[in-house]
Image (cartoon, helix red, strand yellow):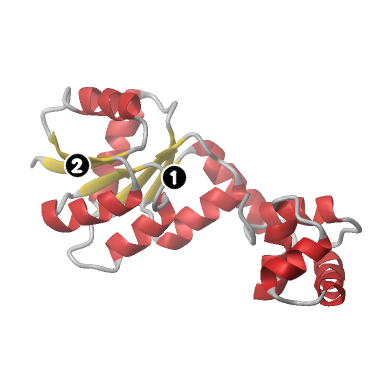
């Protein structure tokens, strides 16, 4: 059985290398290439690949969002995230979006080929560093969830905004910004803005 593959990566050289590597396997056929998530969603609907090799961070639409859109429209392909990023937030977003697997781009060729075949069979495939991170996350005490507004405030703080700038951005008073920050500090167990942003990012509640 030949597996139909869609390669998604915003770097042309990376796409070219993947296509060349995949073409060495008689049971793989690359039916399409996409440079961003939005293009990938359109191609997946038109080409109906068995497996999508999905980059994580791309312009227009990122990998987790594209994955969620693909899986919402049957017949859904298996999605194997192939990325250089292994942070907790990235892993959680990809897994929550429904990806079948998460591998790093430095994975050996045969490991990648085996992962593609396993993903096509509906198996979950995770790189060892990813498994270790998820296991550590499960063992760690749960971080209380931030409210949407608290997360928005910290997202702005992560961009280097002052309290006044955050207030203007979110159309709330500066005193309200301070209140949201203090509540976020308490939930995250920190005492300053930088530590709050770091903790929220590590717990997958904001993006950097």
Q: Circle 1 — which element?
A: loop
Q: Circle 2 — which element?
A: strand
Name the spot of residue 160 as percent of width and height, x first. 75, 50
Label 2 sits on residue: 5
Q: Is residue 145 visible?
A: no
What is the crowding at mark 2: few (fewer than 14 residues within 10 Å), some, or many (at least 20)? many
Q: Earlier in the sequence, mark 2 or mark 1?
A: 2
Name the spot of residue 56 as percent of width and height, x first. 44, 45
| Front label number (2 vs 1) | 1
Residue 26 falls left or right of residue 115? left
- Along the line of sight, the residue nearer the viewer: 63 or 155: 155
**Rendered-image quadrant of the N terminus:** top left
- Disc 2 versus disc 1: distance between alpha carbons? 17 Å
Label 1 sits on residue: 56
Picture quadrant of residue 129: top right
Name the spot of residue 120 as percent of width and height, x first. 23, 49
Residue that extends furthest to the left in the rendered view of this protein: 1
- Along the line of sight, the residue nearer the viewer: 88 or 141: 88
Picture quadrant of residue 191: bottom right
What is the crowding at mark 1: few (fewer than 14 residues within 10 Å), some, or many (at least 20)? many
Picture quadrant of residue 66: bottom left
Residue 40 falls left or right of residue 173? left
């Amino acid at each position: 059985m030949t597996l139909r593959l869609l390669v998604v990566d915003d770097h042309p050289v990376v796409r070219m290398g993947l296509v060349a590597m995949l073409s060495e396997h008689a049971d793989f056929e690359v039916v399409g290439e996409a440079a961003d998530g939005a293009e990938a969603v359109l191609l997946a609907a038109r080409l109906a690949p068995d497996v999508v090799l999905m980059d994580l961070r791309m312009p227009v639409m990122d990998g987790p969002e594209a994955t969620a859109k693909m899986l919402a429209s049957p017949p859904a392909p298996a999605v194997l995230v192939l990325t250089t990023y292994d942070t907790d937030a990235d892993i959680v977003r990809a897994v929550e979006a429904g990806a079948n697997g998460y591998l790093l781009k430095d994975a050996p060729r045969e490991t990648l080929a085996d992962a593609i075949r396993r993903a096509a069979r509906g198996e979950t495939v995770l790189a060892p560093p990813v498994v270790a991170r998820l296991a550590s996350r499960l063992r760690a005490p749960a971080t209380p969830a931030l409210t949407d507004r608290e997360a928005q405030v910290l997202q702005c703080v992560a961009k280097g905004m002052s309290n006044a700038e955050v207030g203007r951005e979110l159309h709330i008073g500066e005193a309200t910004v301070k209140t949201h920050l203090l509540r976020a500090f308490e939930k995250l167990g920190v005492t300053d803005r930088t530590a709050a942003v770091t903790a929220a990012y590590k717990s997958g509640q904001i993006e950097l």
